[in-house]
Image (cartoon, rainbow, N blue to C red):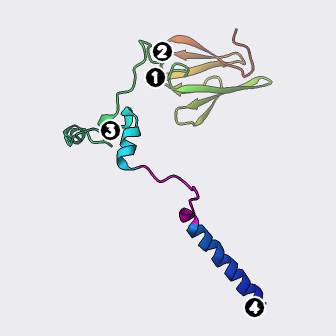
Amino acid sequence: MKGAASLLLVLLGLGFAGLAALPWLGARGAPPPPTAAEAAAAAPAAFAAPEEATTDLSAFLARPLFSAARRPPPPEAPGLPLADPNAGLLFGAYEIAGVVVLGDSALAMLRDREGRLLRLRAGDSVETPEGAAELISVGLDGLTFRHLGATVVAPVRREGASTE
């Protein structure tokens, strides 16, 4: 066992000696790295170092790199008016969540801006920015309110119904 280990060590040593002797034996390995003058001559003009470095940093100091003021303003829409976010709301404050009709009784469900669900029957009223609106009738196709002396009919959208 000792003989095999010492033979292995001798062969390993001869291998390293052979690798170290390759440059003297004329074997070609990787070419030597170019000198600085050769690298500068071979570099394209776009990557050539400037002859004189500028040290004027006043433009960078006037506009700090991580300042919010450096960002460009957001692009403006090309003359399109903004849509009213309350356009689809009933009286600008309520969304029609649904209508339940069971026999002779009907119930309208409205959702306010805070997400609370209001259950209304005919004769109940809701508060609007202009005053109270009384629910006159509840139907599957629409809700009829009396508001400021006028009759307002709010259509009920059905999911899956075509809007043609």
Residue 115 left/right relative to 72: right
Tell me which segment is drawn in magenta. 22-34
Instruction: Give the Cα distance between marks 2 and 1.
Output: 7 Å
106 vs 158, nearest the viewer: 158
Of the residues under marks 4 and 3, which one precedes in the sequence?
A: 4
Callout 1, which amino acid?
Gly
Kindly tell me whether residue 130 is visible in this rendering.
Answer: yes
Residue sitting at x 60%, y 73%: 17
* Element under disc 4: helix
Callout 3, which amino acid?
Ala
Of the residues under marks 2 and 1, which one precedes in the sequence?
A: 1
* Element under disc 3: helix
- How many neighbours does mark 2 have within 10 angstroms: few (below 14), some (14-19), or many (20 or more)? few
Q: Which residue is mark 3?
A: 68
* Element under disc 1: loop
Q: Which residue is mark 1?
A: 131
Q: Which residue is mark 4?
A: 2
Q: Are marks 4 and 3 in contact (CB under 8 Å)?
A: no
142 vs 138, nearest the viewer: 142
- How many neighbours does mark 4 have within 10 angstroms: few (below 14), some (14-19), or many (20 or more)? few
Q: Which mark is residue 148?
A: 2
Kindly tell me whether residue 107 is visible in this rendering.
Answer: no
